[in-house]
Structures are given as structure tokens and as C-alpha cells.
Amino acid sequence: MRKVPELLVPASSLEVLKIAVMFGADAVYIGGEAFGLRAKAKNFSLEEMREGVRFAHAHDVKVYVTANILAHNGDLAGVREYFEELKTVGVDALIISDPGIFMIAREVLPDMELHVSTQANNTNYGTYQFWQQQGAKRVVSARELSMEEIKEIRANIPDELEIETFIHGAMCISYSGRCLLSNYFTGRDANQGACTHPCRWKYAVVEESRPGEYLPVYENERGTYIFNSKDLCMIEYIPELIDAGIDSFKIEGRMKTALYVATVARTYRKAIDDYMESPELYRKNMAWYLDQISNCTYRQFTTGFFFGKPSEEAQIYDSNTYIKEYTYLGIVGSVNENGLYEIEQRNKFSVGEMIEVMKPNGENIEVEVKRIVNEDGEDQMSAPHPKQKLWIDLGYPLDIYDILRRKDEEE
């Protein structure tokens, strides 16, 4: 009997958490306001965490909290205090990379499920066995592992020790995301949550004895992005991932929008469910998965290290920009007595424009914007101000958490 893998989806905010839950996640991972590796993400206050946990648990979805910095001495007292506060929140697991923080979690939260972050560079079954002996329930594999290496790990660890693996999203440079360049260039430590993403910068090479002379290593006049990997995408390899014994399929992206999270979660949800129902159904729907996954922002796709070390084909040398096919307009909220739907607008749209309603069940419905009304009850022809609360009529019945988007015109 094949075990259904968990679909683990990132959430940068309470709004995105709710979208992840509604669009197919089995679990979501979030950051608190301290000790996670995405300091620039919006992150969650304790009260937002409580609300997120209540919402997720009401839909049988788990919530994991990252506390995966590599700590310095001055962090440890604050970590202990933070874990004391988490006792009241009800999260399902902590994601940790630092052994000192792991020990504090064991002491302060003895009943908490603990997962070992990819930041701990988990590349062999001995490491997995070590972390289980310390009390870990799950270990997140290093991004550098091949499918065969993951299979070998599975064969050499107890069945109850879970393997979590990144299957979609950005590929961090250096070793499993332990990015030293950010700290070296800017003083902002990636391992303390302040990464400046030097993997997306433009580089030239200077020879020591000829300072100021930039050597021509670039492909065009814009320079070369020598660390700029394509994004990971394993939607075509669900059978192989399941066969390798991976328990949790992890999506990268705690800085991403609700539209991105909804698109990726919905596509992988359907792919996993289709495969578990019938491998033939999964193969039959492959064109749909590939079309849908390209609807979110991405930097071309690669299979990373799963089938061997990436070649130069996995890199993008001439640009650091995303491919973007859709613009995110907002999430549908409640309906009022006039049959208008509430939306907090994210990008401009206008009356008469054709947009799409994206539904959790896989439907994408093209509709015309019939009417836009502001909070004062006044009609307006367009919605130019981000975060504005509006009431809209699209001539079509909507549901709360439907996402509105607009297909970008091809240049």
C-alpha cells in the first residue's frame, strides 16, 4: 500500500496560510517574529499564529514553525523565552537546525514534535540516525541529495523516522542554503535570517594583480549571474519521489504571494491525488499540471540534484528576473446584502476588464468585471490603490478564498 505523502506548503502571513490550507496543503510551515531564516518575510505574531493554528486545525491541516537559525551565544536566552511563549499556541512541530536550540526545545517543550531543518546539511543515513536518537521525528534532506541517495537513507533508517524533501521552488546556493556570501559582502547573515540573496546578483571577475580590470566572463552586456539557479520543479516525478520513500513533499517560498502559493499547492495537490488514484490518470493530466505550474512566477525549471549533479543547463546566466504570466488581484472575502463580494485589492483592475477566478478545485473561470464599489458605497471605474477594500460584481457566484488574477499580455 503506497503511503500518501504530505504536501507541505509555505506561508508568509495569516492570509497566505489560509490560502495554502484552502488550496490543498496537508501542512503549512511558518515563521515567528524571531529565530527563523526569513527575517524579511512578514512572519507571524503569537496571536496570528494562534489564529492560523485554529484555522488550519479546523481543516485538519498541521502547522510547523521554523526556528532554524544557527544560533550565537546571545540568541539562546531569547530562544528559551520564545519557546515558553509557544507553549500556548498549539503548533504541531518545530523546524530546527542548531543542536543547542534543539536541546532547549527538548527541555522547554518535551512533547513537541521536532523536525531537523535542511540547514543542518543532512546528507547521509548516519546523520538521520543521530537526529532520531536525539528525539527528532523528521529530518529534512539536504538539497544536494540524489533520488538514489534518498532511497539509500530510507533503507537504513527506521520506518517511523520521516524524510522531508524540497520538491519545488528556489534553489539556494552554497551547501543546503548555508549562504556565506551574504554575510561576507553585506554583513547580513543568511544563517541568522537576513539573507540578501547574493545568488541573484550580477558578477564579474577581477584578477589580483590587476585591480579595477574586469575580466570578460559574461555572456552579454548585462553581466553574468553565476549563482542564479533555475527553480526546482518535480511535478513530472511524483512516482519517483514516492518510490524513494519521501514522507513530506516540501514547497519552498516563505516570501511568496498568495497567488504563487495557491497555484503551486493546487497543482501538486491534484498531481498527488491523481497518482494515488491511478498512475494512468496522473500521466493523462500531466499537460494540465505543467500548464498550471507555469502560471506562477518562476525562473525556468530544473530537477536540481535528484538525477545527478546539475550541469550549466541548470543555471541562468543572463538575467535574474522571474517569468511571470499572471498578476495577482486579490482574494475573495464575504458577500454583502447587495450580492457584491469583498476584496482587498492587490493590483489595478478596471470595470469591463476580463479577469480569472481561480478556484481550489482546479477550475479557472474567465469573468468580466461588472462593477467596483468602494467602502463609501461609491462606484468607481478602476481599482488603482493597493490594499484598498472594495466590493465587486463579476457576474458570477464566488466563494470565500477564491483568488482573482489577470493574465499578462505577451510582449
Image (cartoon, rainbow, N blue to C red):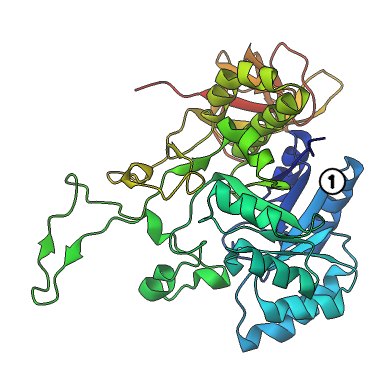
Q: Position of residue 132 (x, y in %)?
A: 77, 68
- Determine whether 126 is above or below 315 in the image: below
- Determine whether 244 is above or below 347 in the image: below
- Along the viewing direction, whichever of 93 and 46 lies nearer the viewer: 93
Residue at image x 69%, y 51%? Answer: 13
- Determine whether 235 is above or below 247 in the image: above
Residue at image x 61%, y 23%? Answer: 380
- Along the viewing direction, whichever of 401 and 273 lies nearer the viewer: 273
Question: Image quarter for residue 186?
Answer: bottom left
Q: Is residue 107 left or right of residue 75?
A: right
> SS at mark 1?
helix
Residue at image x 14%, y 76%? Answer: 208
Q: Is residue 57 left or right of residue 363?
A: right
Q: How many numbered callouts?
A: 1
Query: Can residue 345 be seen by looking at this rendering?
Result: no
Q: Position of residue 86 (x, y in %)?
A: 84, 68
Question: Image quarter for residue 155?
Answer: bottom right
Q: Is residue 357 left or right of residue 232?
A: right
Residue at image x 12%, y 74%? Answer: 211
On the image, numbered disc 1 is attached to which residue?
A: 56
Q: Position of residue 206 (x, y in %)?
A: 16, 68
Locate the N terminus and report the quarter of the image it occupies.
top right
Locate the C terminus and report the quarter of the image it occupies.
top left
* Amino acid bearing label 1: Ala
Q: Position of residue 28 (x, y in %)?
A: 74, 49
